[in-house]
Image: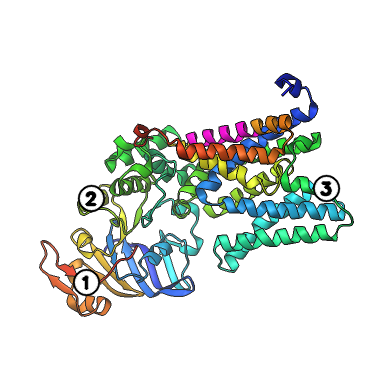
């Protein structure tokens, strides 16, 4: 560890990595709170695979990987909802089908390619240190958009997560807003794809929120803890991966896992249990 | 009944999960009427409430509420109906306070993209006071007892300033003492707010002293009238079987039926 933080921050790629990991950590952990409360985390995993299939197709036909990831991510959310409604399937079944079908699609696209494309594996396992300025701009823009919509409908999302039927019955367009939330979730996955990879993004959605839940009494606390865990693990992960020359995505996820274990074994204070 | 009905159901059939749950129901409910809906498990009681809420539409016949066919029901109509769903084993770790639950009753009126005003806060405060839960406002909802949770959910419904209050098995999962207090609360709210109430329950004896009308369901409508008229061997037996026992109660007959209630 010969480099000081100041030195590290003087490198352009490290500046980009810190900025990218801040926004990805923040957006994933906040969107993750509602995904965890509403039991939708698996949708995140499903769209991650779909988005990866989009990237693979982009490489195959020479189109923009990001654009294809967005199309595949949002498309999967749309089709999953449709299949659920028409096929009268339980959500876990329809998501499970797309989770694997889109992976099969990705493998098919990769098989059709001529030659070996190592960049693709970056989208699978993530490489935050290779985030470009263009990537960063896209991450910033979409993060701002996701968080804006998220906070605009925050009170409705809270109600829907608490009880969707009751929300619908109270005169809130709960079904439509649930779909809006799923699109936000899909976009969250897409912006995280290059930095943490489609396999590990699931952890960023689930772990900070699950750990925060162990300690939080109120929604505000849960959001705050989750964001704190998401951003700090992401930053520390970037630093460690640079210092020790280890994969960034895996480092971030393992750090979060340690926090989760701590949250389970260090319970919240007992006297606080009654009053929120 | 002198008043024109606030709810009009004409020859309506409802399907749930592809099966006919209610068949050929015709039912008028007057403004301010307190209706108790009884019937065995799977008799379509909850389906009736979902139809009244406009969450499902009749496959045959019509259902009108506030002179509005339920197919056309918009969000602002729903905001005038307070709804207490059946308590399910809710997640007692869900991060939400009693105050926040009650405030959710205002969300339909507040609308999207807006925050609660001081007027909304006043209404929520009054609603929590009306159910005796104002002192618990900052408690985590999941940490309250079943009876207290129901009171907070009633406050949430009251915060909507509803004309109609729909309740699905409000006394399930709470102890007998709390059940009794809850029913007395509902009776008081009915008078105080001039609410039209439709209360679904399997507990005939708990509600028969306080309702105006009993509706007896078993997919079809088997009876509608004052408790004293409906709670008779002749009317109950086709629904519950011959083992129905009716004895003299304090104000209304006491009924014993063989009906196991599963949760």
* Residue matched to label 3: A118
Image spot of residue B6 (x, y percent): 36, 60
Which of labels 1 and 3 is toward the front? 3
Image spot of residue A59 (x, y percent): 84, 52
Residue A199 colored in magenta in the image: no
Region of the chain picked out in magenta, as a range: A220-234
Q: Is residue A90 above or below residue A254?
A: below
Residue A83: image quadrant is bottom right
Q: Chain of mark 1?
A: B
Q: Nearer the viewer, residue A67 or B109?
A: A67
Rendering colour mode? rainbow
Q: Is residue A44 above or below residue B29?
A: above
Q: Chain of mark 2?
A: B
Q: CA distance from mark 1 to mark 3?
A: 72 Å
* Residue matched to label 1: B257
* Residue matched to label 2: B178
What type of secondary structure mainly makes up the magenta span? helix
Q: Chain of mark 3?
A: A
- Determine crowd level at label 1: few under 14, some 14-19, many 20+ residues with C-alpha closer than 10 A: some
Is residue B32 in view from this perspective?
yes
């Amino acid at each position: 560890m010969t480099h000081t933080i100041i030195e590290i921050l003087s490198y352009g790629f490290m500046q980009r990595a810190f900025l990218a990991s801040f926004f990805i950590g923040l957006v994933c952990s906040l969107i993750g709170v509602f995904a965890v409360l509403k039991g939708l985390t698996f949708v995140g995993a499903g769209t991650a695979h779909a988005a990866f299939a989009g990237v693979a197709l982009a490489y195959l036909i020479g189109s923009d990987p990001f654009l294809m990831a967005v199309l595949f991510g949002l498309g999967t959310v749309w089709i999953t909802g449709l299949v659920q409604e028409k096929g009268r399937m339980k959500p876990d079944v329809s998501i499970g089908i797309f989770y694997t079908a889109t992976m099969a699609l990705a493998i098919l696209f990769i098989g059709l390619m001529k030659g070996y494309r190592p960049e693709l594996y970056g989208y699978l396992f993530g490489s935050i240190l290779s985030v470009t300025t263009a990537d960063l701009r896209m991450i910033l823009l979409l993060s701002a958009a996701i968080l804006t919509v998220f906070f605009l409908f925050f009170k409705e999302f809270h109600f829907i997560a608490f009880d969707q039927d009751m929300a619908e019955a109270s005169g809130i367009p709960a079904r439509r807003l649930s779909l809006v939330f799923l699109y936000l979730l899909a976009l969250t996955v897409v912006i995280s794809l290059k930095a943490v990879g489609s396999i590990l993004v699931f952890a960023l959605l689930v772990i900070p929120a699950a750990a925060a839940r162990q300690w939080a009494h109120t929604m505000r606390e849960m959001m705050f803890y989750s964001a704190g865990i998401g951003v700090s693990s992401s930053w520390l992960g970037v630093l460690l991966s640079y210092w020790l020359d280890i994969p960034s995505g895996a480092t971030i996820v393992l750090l979060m896992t340690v926090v989760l274990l701590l949250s389970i074994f260090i319970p919240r204070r007992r006297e606080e249990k009654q009053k929120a | 009944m002198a008043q024109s009905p606030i709810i009009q159901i004409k020859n309506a059939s409802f399907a749930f999960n592809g099966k006919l749950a209610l068949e050929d129901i015709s039912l008028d409910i007057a403004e301010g009427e307190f209706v108790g809906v009884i019937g065995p498990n799977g008799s379509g009681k909850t389906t009736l409430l979902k139809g009244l809420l406009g969450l499902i539409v009749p496959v045959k016949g019509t259902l009108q509420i506030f002179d509005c066919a339920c197919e056309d029901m918009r969000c602002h109509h729903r905001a005038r109906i307070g709804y207490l769903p059946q308590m399910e084993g809710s997640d007692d770790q869900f991060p939400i306070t009693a105050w926040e639950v009650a405030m959710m009753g205002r969300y339909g009126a507040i609308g999207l993209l807006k925050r609660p005003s001081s007027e909304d806060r006043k209404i929520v405060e009054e609603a929590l006071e009306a159910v005796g839960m104002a002192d618990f406002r900052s408690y985590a909802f999941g940490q309250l007892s079943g009876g207290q949770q129901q009171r907070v959910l009633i406050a949430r419904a009251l915060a909507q300033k509803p004309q109609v209050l729909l309740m699905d098995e409000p006394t399930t999962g709470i102890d007998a003492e709390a059940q009794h207090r809850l029913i007395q609360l509902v009776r008081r709210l009915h008078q105080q707010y001039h609410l039209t109430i439709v209360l679904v329950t399997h507990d005939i004896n708990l509600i028969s002293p306080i309702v105006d009308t009993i509706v007896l369901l078993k997919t079809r409508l088997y009876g509608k009238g004052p408790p004293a008229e409906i709670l008779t061997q002749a009317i109950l037996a086709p629904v519950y079987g011959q083992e129905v026992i009716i004895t003299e109660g304090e104000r209304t007959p006491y009924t014993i039926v063989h009906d196991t209630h599963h949760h």
